[in-house]
Image (cartoon, grey):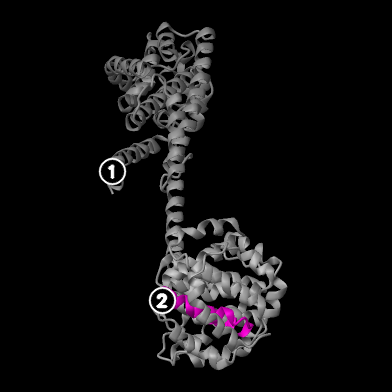
Amino acid sequence: MTGPGEELAELLWDRGPALRRAPPPFQPFTCSAAGSSRSQELKRHASDTTKASAFVTAVSVPLGTHDAGSGLGLAGLPVHDDDDAVPWLHCPVADDGDGDTAPLPPEFCAGLLSEYSEVAAPAPAFHAAATPPAEAAANKLAPPSAAGGGEGVLNFTFFSRPLQRPQAAAAPAAAAASNPVESTVVQAAANRLRSTPLFSEQRMAWLQPPKAPRTTAAAAAPPPPPLAPLLPDSRHGETVGTVAQPQPRSQPEARPPDAAAVTTSSVCSGNGGRSQLKRSRHLAADCSVSPDEDLDDEPGATRRSAARSAKRCRTAEVHNLSERRRRDRINEKMRALQELIPNCNKVDKSSMLEEAIEYLKTLQLQVQMMSMGTGLCMPPAAMLLPAMQQQLLHHHPMAHFPHLGMGLGFGMGAAAGFDMLPFPCVAAGAHFPCPPGAMFGVPGQAMPSLPAAFAHMYGAGSGAGPAGQTEAADAAAPARPGEAEQGDQQVQHAKQT
Amino acid sequence: MSNRRSRSRQSGSSRITEEQISDLVSKLQDLLPEARLQSNARVPSARVLQETCNYIRNLHQEVDDLSERLSELLATSDMSSAQAAVIRSLLM
């Protein structure tokens, strides 16, 4: 363990040369394997993200190597214009390897943080060194924090990193910055698989590389808690307020206290008074802290509205479905009906229904006629239709037993007390198989045209006529043929239709 | 937008036929015997159509029975030629 101050100074003053040094092969994993603990390296990267936006994007690539588990990040590295950041990144790793775990004095940390938070704080020594271009300055700022090597310092860099990240104000930078948060959380939280659906794949990818160094991460975890209280003081007031806020968020996840402290602090710094980039914070929070956090923010709102619209869609869908089912049922019945109707080749429903109505009427008429015919000609009285029964109520016995002798008919009629009925054929009734036409004379006038056919029938049947017809029968007689013709026509018409 | 408008127009035109059809279905319902449907209650069209189908089948069956009986009658009974003609016309 070397003194942190010396190391820092050395680094600081080496900064310039380091930047201009020929870029050594960047191998983050080999570096970490060389001696520095994994967590430190991670933290270094995290601290790197606190730099200016351009630098942040550059740093995101090494982080990508961590996340994706290698090749990808290395390949993507040269893409960034800040190539000088790469050599610099490499250097602190070596430093970490030399003398790490040297706790920095809190004051130093405070200064560092205050500077990160852009509070007008007395700049430390390396501030002076940070004169060159903005990039260089940013780069120089980082080395001390990373080179501090001590977990405490590194943790502070954690804190400061997300704070600076919003300043970066670049979407990719924000995304990249959220990665370090996640990676550190993953390490510190000891390989907890959280179920945030959004980033689960990424998280899985991240979980694989850090597995080996997790033990070191666990070792490195303890320092943060004592330092955490210091952090808000060193910052401006806003952060103090925000510190408490995220804690309950991370607490429900029931992570070990140390890990919780780490993550919460990182989130705190993420809040860090930099409200300008809420979105980036959301990103970080989403992937690092908890899935339920987004319930009270924009993503949650959109999700809720999406759920509402989805519900609306579902009800509409159900309605459409039921409506369609109803229509299908009707169409099916229509087809069945069409099959029942002979010669119905109508296409549209309404004309088909009209046809069905006409056919139904015709069928009813036909059945009526036939039943009357059978009823008149055959004994079963039940075949008579109601209308005809009403019409022929008084002639019931005669009508229903046309082939029986008049004696029976008379007997029944007499028994029924049909005194109004003329029974001129009582005497001669036995001669006629059918009731005399006179019987239909009176009712025949009131009869509908349909039964008139049968009146004609009977009229024809009893063509000879009874010898003693009453006046009523006589009066009805002239009307009979016309009625009969009419009824006949009706019957014919019914058959044709 | 245009899709929605076209759909609404389509539904508007189909509503007319829908009304026509419901009108015809109610007419059909009037033709059905009371026992089949409670005419007071609002009966769904599909049910009316179903009952119509059943009723038509019943009527067909009845016609078959009656014609059979009539033909029997025609064959056996000693009726007049006019009667026979009427029955024959019914059997046609």
Pinpoint the chain carrying mark 2. A
Compare residues A245 and A360 and report the one nearer the observer: A245
Read off the magenta span: A133-159
- Please tell me how crowded label 1 is: few (under 14), some (14-19), or many (20+) other residues with Cα within 10 Å: few
Pinpoint the chain carrying mark 1. B
Place residue A69 in its image quadrant: bottom right
Instruction: Work out whether A104 lies above or below A295.
Output: below
Report whether A37 appears left or right of A131.
right
The amino acid type found where label 2 is placed reads Gln
Residue A449 rendering spot, x and y as whole percentages:
32, 23
Residue for badge 2: A167
Residue A334 rendering spot, x and y as whole percentages:
42, 32
Query: Is A202 in the magenta?
Result: no
Residue A155 rendering spot, x and y as whole percentages:
59, 82
In the rendered image, the quadrant that contains the N terminus of chain A is: bottom right
Can the viewer see residue A85 in this picture?
A: yes
